[in-house]
Amino acid sequence: MCGGYAAGGGYREVWRLSLATLQWAPMPALVSGRTGHACCAVRGALVVLGGETDHGLTSSVEMLSEGGEFVELPPLSCGEICGAAAIAVEEGDSAAGQVLPVGGMAPPGGEAVSTVQLVDLATGVCTPQPALLHARNLPAAARMLDGRILFAGGIGVSDVQSTAEIWGPPVQGDMDAAWIWRALPAMGAAHA
């Protein structure tokens, strides 16, 4: 559990749950308290991207170092993000790893977006990817065993999203072609 909202602003605390003992243990605190941030594990280290700090939306990135404390990485070249989901990307050509932040909200009005970026954590450079089929703020995300990535729910432009979509290889399986989005049936839809 990492960051969040506490009375008066962003929360800096980080907690780890041991699945063996079902006990919570404190971890080093974030450099900046934040809420609405994206986080995921990259190469065994916790990475925190963007969110809202006491100073507003941020493009800052933090990673739990081998030294046991959070350190700041280069900021996101694509600017501030908030409300995005993040998935680590399997790769071998990045010094610090790569993350795929997806969706979120656009400043200043907070409208849901369909933005997808590939972020190189060593440099902070964001490379645009094919956009989501539906704008989503605060979506759920998970990598499937076959490598595809599932995104579901969240808050859309006008209301709660009840759709899901999956990001995977092209239908023909051409590994040189760009990965594409496919819509899944709406949650709660009757099965035929």
Image: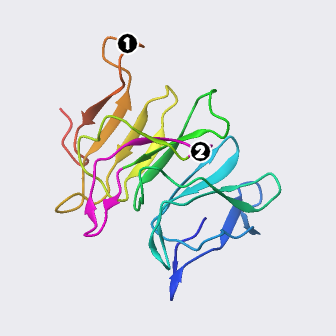
Label 2 neighbour load within 10 Å: few <14, some 14-19, many 20+: many
182 lies left or right of 56: left
| Front-lying residue, 137 or 143 | 137
Q: Residue furthest bottom?
A: 8
Sequence order check, earlier mark of 1 and 2: 2
Question: What element does badge 2 sit on?
Answer: loop
Q: Is residue 36 above or below residue 178?
A: below
Q: Which mark is residue 173?
A: 1
Of residues 171 and 97, the one nearer the viewer is 97
Residue at point 44%, 30% (across, down): 148
For the point 26% across and 36% down, the residue is 184
Residue 34 percent coordinates (x, y): 53, 71
The stretch in magenta equals 103-123
Spot occupied by residue 100 in the image (x, y as percentages of width and height): 47, 42
Neighbor class of circle 1 (other Cα within 10 Å; few <14, some 14-19, many 20+) is few
Q: Is residue 116 magenta?
A: yes
Q: Residue furthest right?
A: 67
Is 35 placed left or right of 168 in the picture?
right
Q: Which residue is labeled 2 in the image?
A: 121
Q: Report the amino acid beneath label 2.
A: Leu
137 vs 93, left or right, is left
Q: Answer yes or no: do the residues labelled 1 and 2 have beta carbons within 8 Å?
A: no
Which part of the image, by quadrant, shows the C terminus?
Answer: top left
Give the SS element for disc 1.
loop
Corner quadrant of residue 2? bottom right
Q: Quadrant location of residue 91?
A: top right
Residue 130 percent across, percent down from the top left: 31, 34
Q: Position of residue 159 (x, y in %)?
A: 19, 62
The overriding secondary structure of the stretch rendered in magenta is loop
Question: What colour scheme does the image use?
Answer: rainbow
- What residue appears at the point 50 percent right and 79 percent down from the top-left corner? 54
In magenta stretch: residue 27? no
